[in-house]
Image (spheres, rainbow, N blue to C red):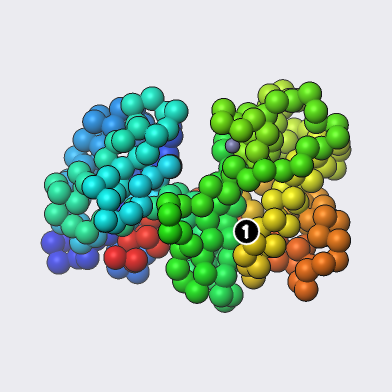
Amino acid sequence: MIPAMTQSIGLIEAGGTKFVLGLADANGAIVARHRIATTTPDETIAAALQWFQQQGPIARMGIAAFGPLDLDRASPHWGHVLSTPKPHWSMADLAGPFARILGCPVAIDTDVNGAALAESKWGAGQGVRSCVYLTIGTGVGGGAVINGHILGGAGHPEMGHMRLDRHPDDRAYFGYCSFHGGCLEGLACGPAILARWGKSLSDLPSGGAEQQMIAWYLGQAVVSLQAILAPARIILGGGVMATPGLIDLVRTHADGLGKGYFATRPADILTLPGLGDDAGLMGAFALSQTI
Ligand code: ZN
């Protein structure tokens, strides 16, 4: 039990397979954590509420969640999951129950926007005015932080669904995205790699044709992001980027695709994340600070 005088901040990293719950002090030190399986919204949110109620008073909450989300504070559906292929979760209210039952202000945003903000404050995006965080894992998503603010407006970015040129040796594969086939996510996410080659990228030959192809796709994404936003840093995270040496292949392809046009070489702004295992909860904490 946390003493009643402590300013406890509730944190949720809401993922497709699990919800990671956390409790932080005012400085962001995580003092308790708990994980529950993601099942139906009713079950999952009730279990999360029960855990937070056992922790004592919550001063405020940050929720970093899978999307898509309604992030318009003026909308009656603010904090709801929008249409999603994930069963049961379309139009689920993720923020409201915590605000009502725990009686505290709640900030909610996408997990990648939370990670982008946390990386900009405490990780690989420290000390620069703008950064983009892109995660390449079971899906692909990204967020941008400019002068300490998350870039958005009409919703949140969907960087994973940008269009890419096809690699000449990749014509046979349709793509993993159920909406677009061969968008960035459809071509470069973990399941797309497994679908083509039956192995994860780290189990395929180092620097081989498969790794080069994925790096070429990621290089295209990097050059497009640089052309649109001119971020001081682009942080590439997620399970696929844990492939040893992949970041260097992406640097080489991004420089090649940039053709020397950009004042800053794409390779020079590319980096791996600075935050480790607690990145998701730190994202939620960073969001809680926006209240
Ligand atoms: Zn797509």
Residue 15 picture location, percent across and down: 42, 39
For the image, the number of numbered tags is: 1
Which residue is nearer to you in this view: 37 or 105?
A: 105
> As displayed, is residue 84 above or below residue 160?
above
Classify mark 1: helix, strand or loop: strand
- Residue drawn at x 72%, y 48% as measured from the top left: 218
Can residue 218 be seen in this snapshot? yes
Which residue is nearer to you in this view: 279 or 145?
A: 145
Which residue is nearer to you in this view: 63 or 30?
A: 63
Instruction: Examine the image and state in which quarter residue 103 appears.
Output: bottom left
- Residue drawn at x 42%, y 28% as measured from the top left: 86
Residue 227 picture location, percent across and down: 69, 62
Q: Is mark 1 within 8 Å of ligand 1?
A: no
Horizontally, residue 154 falls left or right of residue 75, namely right
Amino acid type, callout 1: Ile
Residue 193 picture location, percent across and down: 70, 31
Horizontally, residue 186 falls left or right of residue 217, namely left
Quadrant hosting ligand 1: top right
* Number of residues whose C-alpha sits closer than 10 Å to that of mark 1, classed few (under 14), some (14–19) or many (20 or more): many
Can residue 189 be seen in this snapshot? no
Residue 29 picture location, percent across and down: 37, 63
Instruction: Examine the image and state in which quarter residue 65 appears.
Output: top left
- Residue drawn at x 30%, y 47% as measured from the top left: 79
Quadrant of the image containing the C terminus: bottom left
- Residue drawn at x 33%, y 61% as measured from the top left: 288
> As displayed, is residue 274 above or below residue 17?
below
Q: Which residue is mark 1?
A: 235
